[in-house]
Amino acid sequence: MDQRLAFALNTAYQAGRSTLAHFNNLESVEIKSDDSPVTIADKQAESLIRAAISKTYPKDSILGEEEGASGSSLTRWVIDPIDGTKSFVAGVPLFATLLSFEIEGVPEIGIAYIPALDEMYYAKRGEGAYCNGRPISVSNASTLKGGTLLCGGHKTLMERGRLEGFLELVPGTRATRTWGDAFGHIMVASGRAEAMIDPRVNRWDISSVSLIVQEAGGTWTTFDGKQDLTDEAISSNGKVHNEVLAAFHPLDNSGS
C-alpha cells in the first residue's frame, strides 16, 4: 500500500477513535462565529492529526477546520476532525473524520472514517474506492425515479435558494432523507443513494469525499456543473447527474 495512504488511514482512524470518548458524553458545546458547534472532541482530533502530519511529513501544508491553514507547500493535507458536529452533539452516529491529501489543489487521497460505525471509506486517485478494504461503487440507476435523494438539511437549502429545485426532484423519488454531511456523499459512493444535494460546504467538507465518489464511479460538481471545490456540491452516481442539475435553475441575482 502507498505510504501516504497507509499513513492517512492510520491517522484518521486514531483521530476518529479519539472522538468516541466524548460521544454521548459531552460536558459543553461551544458555538463558533458562524453559528456552528465545536466540541473538545473536534479540537483534540484535529490536534492529533496535525501532530502526526508534522512528525511524518513536516514540509507539507495543512488546512483544518478548527486551526486554519499553515505552511506554503503545494502538497497539502486537509482536515475535518468531525464532519457532522451537529449530529455528534445530538448523539447521532453518522459523523465522520475526514482527511485528504492534495497536490496543487487536486485531491489525491481521500479518507472518510465513521468511528461510531467503524466504517473506513477511502480512495486514492486512479485506484478505486473502498470501505473496510472492500471495493465500493455507485448505483446503476439511470433516473431518480424510484431512487433515493439526499440533502444536508432543508434549512440550508432554503437559505441558499435551492429548496425549490430540491422539491422539484422529490415527487419522482422513492425516498428523500437528510443523511447529510460526509455520510450523504458516502451513501452515494457506496450505491445506497443516487444523489446528494449539499448547498453549503467548505474545502474540508468536500475534498476527501469528492475523490471517494469519483473513484467509486460517480460524479460531483457545483450546482452549475463545474468541478470546483467551492462552497456547494452535488454528488451522484453520474447517470442521474444531468437530471439533478436541470432542477436547479440559475438563481436570479438581478434584483428584479
Image (cartoon, rainbow, N blue to C red):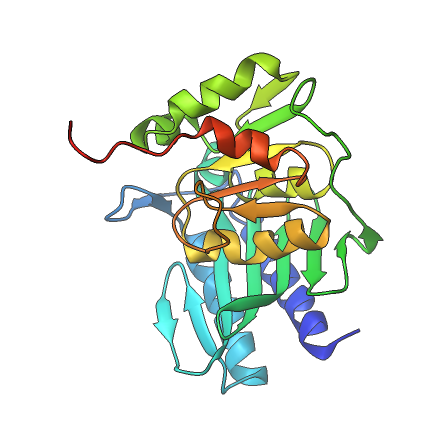
Q: Can residue 94 be seen in this view?
A: no
Q: Which residue is drawn at 68% across and 65% down?
A: 125
Q: Nearer the viewer, residue 181 or 12?
A: 181
Q: Is residue 51 left or right of 191 when viewed as pictured? A: left
Q: Is residue 84 above or below residue 167?
A: below
Extreme residue toward the left, this view: 255
Q: Which of 41 and 83 is in front in this view?
A: 83
Q: Can residue 55 be seen in this view?
A: yes
Residue 102 lies, in percent from the top left, at: 54, 70
Q: Which residue is drawn at 74% across and 30% down?
A: 141
Q: Is residue 160 left or right of 142 when viewed as pictured? A: left
Q: Quadrant of the N terminus?
A: bottom right
Q: Nearer the viewer, residue 43 or 127?
A: 127
Q: Is residue 148 left or right of 95 when viewed as pictured? A: right
Extreme residue toward the bottom, this view: 59
Residue 150 lies, in percent from the top left, at: 56, 29
Q: How many labels does the image show?
A: 0
Q: Is residue 65 left or right of 1 when viewed as pictured? A: left
Extreme residue toward the right, this view: 134
Q: Residue at x 33, y 43 (%)?
A: 36
Residue 167 lies, in percent from the top left, at: 46, 18
Using the rendered view, name the quadrant where residue 9 is placed.
Answer: bottom right
Residue 210 lies, in percent from the top left, at: 58, 53
